[in-house]
Amino acid sequence: MGKTRAGRFALRGQRTALLHLETMTQAVDSADSVDPRALEALNRYFGYDSFRPGQSGIVSAILTGHDVLGVMPTGAGKSICYQIPAAILPGVAIVISPLISLMRDQVDALNDVGLPAAFINTTQTPDEQDLVFAQALSGQIKLLYVAPERLETERFRNFAVRVPISLVAVDEAHCVSQWGQDFRSSYLGIGEFIAGLPTRPTVAAFTATATERVRRDIVSILGLHTPSITVTGFDRPNLYFDVISMPRKDKASWVASYIASHPDESGIVYCATRKETEALAESLNSAVAELRAAGGADVSDIGTIAVAYHGGMSADAREKAQRDFVTDRVPVVVATNAFGMGIDKSNVRFVIHHNMPESIEAYYQEAGRAGRDGEPSRCTLLWNESDIVTRRRLLDSDYENERLTPEEQEAVRASKRRLLDAMVGYCRTTDCLHAYMTRYFGETAGAAAKTDGKCVGGCANCEHTFETIDVTDIARAISRCVHDVNQHVGSGKIVKVLRGSKAQDLSYLNPESLPSFGMLDEVPEARIRDVLSQMATDGFLTIAEGRLPIVGFGPRAAETVAPEFHYDIKKIKRADARARRTPDVSTPAVGSYVPDDGDEALFQKLRALRLDIARELGKPPYIVFSDKTLRDMVRVKPITDDQFLAVNGVGESKLKQYGERFLAAIREDSGDEA
């Protein structure tokens, strides 16, 4: 593929995708439409009696030979949507997954429930790969995991034309789009690979983060045929969202205090740079131990609290850090965004961002690694003004892609600036954080579940843990200026007009004749920019995509001229150096499970048993059972095989492997040794 062909192919796809969208259908879940084979397989392998929202429609579509695009939040069960059809359909399903380091866990989990799966990647010798190819050709494997780069090799293509492929499932499908946060050029070859197969299989694409524009890219570039599209909703009501403006020097102590006060929880801390991950992990190991010792805890055998993970580490070091974390040997990983995509660890109870991410898509994916099992978990973002400066500097200096022309690179760079503006808006908004995120992905403001005016999962904004500034007059002036210039200029010129600038590049506007000229001459430029950006994220304004980001009116623009219009933004505190030596980490994940003492003791007993079994087998504990399944065991307290099968998440294979030991532990706890 030529230097810019792939980039132009992707850009051209946005136009042709519009034709596909006209014929797309929306998958609908209905108890009457669920294939009985799918329900039987769901219960047999995974121990569930019914599908989650969105799953059955996707499964039914695949089983009837329809291409699908599933946009489902992390933890909603995307993998079930292709694993169940793979179990039922003849031949093998090819699963395209971006990170080879995660394939082993995914394959182990499937084999653990009785579904034969394997992977092909660079960690294997040629002989090991030949064995997997032979098993797939003889029908012994139902799911084969590969990285997208593997599809370009002659060896794999020769194999692919000889094996009956029933399904190609593309995980993290947003990676195909240059307009998302995680574009990977290797994904551009997937459509060509599918087109080169002797018989075209059903194609299923899945992602947790895709705006409408990215969805169009996925459909076009992968070549999906009139796909059934399911968007299940982006809200994660089991997550508590928290945003805290904090000076950089206070962040490490806040993180240490949080971890020290949650000793039984597993979590991820994201940092912007490799250097920060190593420094923070090192400081946490000493600071957390000191805090726990000060609280009277015995820290003689505390071990390592946090490990670092970033792309600059050796492959062996990264593999060890990841294994220690997913097997619960180390409770916390401090990482760059190189860590996490596709991580199946279900019992991550908190995700803390030490720095502001570059986009809502990135934050949604990274924060969404908390609470994959549906249990209450917390996502906290620590940020300050210098984070914004750093992100903008990195964005302007660090985006090069040899597949794109300079013009295309600038268009992508401009798009990424707007992604960053939306992330800044999340930090500054006074709106419900759940609602802000769902609205960003195209859902209505009411998409986030509410109870008594507050979001179900809980967020810092609904609890009003911040001060606000009245910027009503600034917002009205901005809106007036956008009107005065006929929605024909960008944000920089709007700020100049409002500030009364006489810059040469404004002369064609004859700015002094405009009613809004100089209207905000005493307001700092940064404040005007902040309000304009927030108005765009809140729907009062729009900022066009492309090389010329023109500011126009949004769907809520008329509100700014109504007499009752009022507009607030968050007040950004400049903390006194002497203030708040001990950070407040007390806010709980709203809706947290509160068992009685006996139930909690049994839960901890089952967790310990799970860990013992996992270490005996060399597997991550969540592959044995999730926290959610252990909670259900505590609730049901099964003492027979049939009762054990009634626990959510227990299938036939799990009963055979682990049932006897867990049942014995439950009987012992209840005093029933029979």
Image (cartoon, rainbow, N blue to C red):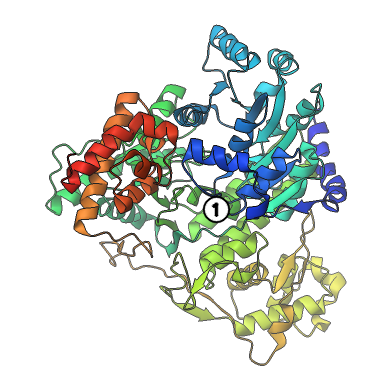
- 70 to the left or right of 105: right
| Quadrant into which the N terminus falls | top right
User: Residue 429, position in %: x, y?
Assistant: 54, 70
Q: Residue at x 68, y 52 (%)?
A: 230
Q: Is residue 462 visible?
A: yes
Disc 1 residue type (three-letter)? Tyr
**Does 123 sit above or below residue 173?**
above
**Does 425 sit above or below residue 8?**
below
Q: Secondary structure at mark 1?
A: helix
Q: Residue at x 33, y 47 (%)?
A: 633
User: Residue 25, position in %: x, y?
Assistant: 78, 52
Q: Viewer-proximal residue, 610 or 321? A: 610
Q: Give the residue pinned by disc 1.
A: 364
User: Residue 564, position in %: x, y?
Assistant: 63, 91
- 667 to the left or right of 658: left
Q: Residues within 10 Å of mark 1 (few under 14, many from 20)?
A: many
| Quadrant into which the C terminus falls | top left
